[in-house]
Image: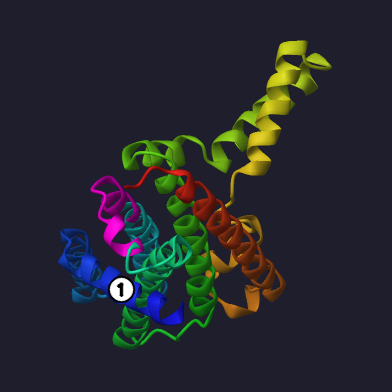
Amino acid sequence: MLHQLWTNIKINLKFYRRNRLLLGTAVFISFVMGLSALPSLFTLSAAKHMKIIQGVFSQLSWFTFIITAGLAIMLISYHTRDRSVKMVFTKPCPPEAWILSSFLSASLVSLLLYAGTLAICSALFVAWDVPFQWGILYMTVNDFMSTIILISYMTFLAVLMHPLLALLFAVIFQGGTFFYIKLLLMGKAANDGGLSVPLTLLKGLVDGIYLLLPSFSPFSGKTSKLYRSLRLDDANWEYLLLTFGYTVFVSALMYVLSVYFFKKKRLI
């Protein structure tokens, strides 16, 4: 299976390379680098340069987060919709290996992009003679794990539905949306001294959906101080380990569900 897995990963990377999406990624990164270099033409304080580095990291991390999720959807949907998976499974290659190779391929691209983001930010520290803040390493690892969760989730959605529906579902049905609804219902319950039967049922439904949906940043409230300061002293390694465990659990669960529903699809 390892040979099949590695073969599929190489084929997937070739598929990404021939797609315009990664070219767009390179153009975007070059554009961000160009914008980040503009302030160096003016006299700015170290604090201003630090803010710029934070902004560059945030933009590139967000773009990596989105682009790799798109890669996961694109690979699954493209080969499923044009029935080309028939050629894969008659090699033979089990669906388990193909789904896993799709997940690992997108994760590998994500890893390379985050490494590039870290390299760019490190170069800005050196170019502007700003003391390197090691907290950016923590942020890179934390954001990478968030992206892994998203990739696994989008792989699962791509197996279930059309890619556009998968994107809409991911945007609308996210933990933040239902957490906001929970707060509204809790506020109404506090003001009115309780909820009516329909709203109580709605709250139960919202709570259930909120618990079922994966969180892409499960401990964001505990790491916000680090993201503002970039100082490693503000890091809490316990939450990074908990995020790692959560990432492994969610990814494994999404993989099992993806394989199960993929086998149920009429692919040939």
Q: Secondary structure at mark 1?
A: loop
Q: Amino acid at mark 1?
A: Leu
Asked whether residue 84 is drawn in magenta, I would say: yes
Q: Residue at x 42, y 72 (%)?
A: 47
Are there few (<14), some (14-19), or many (20+) residues within 10 Å of tag 1? few
Q: Is residue 187 left or right of residue 63?
A: right
Residue 104, image x, y percentages: 42, 70
Q: Is residue 199 left or right of residue 117?
A: right
Secondary structure that dominates the magenta span: helix
Q: Is residue 196 visible?
A: no
Q: Is residue 171 left or right of residue 207?
A: left
110, above or below 173, in the image: below
Asked whether residue 81 is drawn in magenta, I would say: yes
Residue 95, image x, y percentages: 44, 60
Quarter holding residue 162: top left
Residue 156, image x, y percentages: 47, 50
Number of numbered discs overlaid on the protein picture: 1
The residue that mark 1 highlights is 44
Q: Residue at x 49, y 66 (%)?
A: 143
* Residue range corresponding to the magenta coloring: 76-89
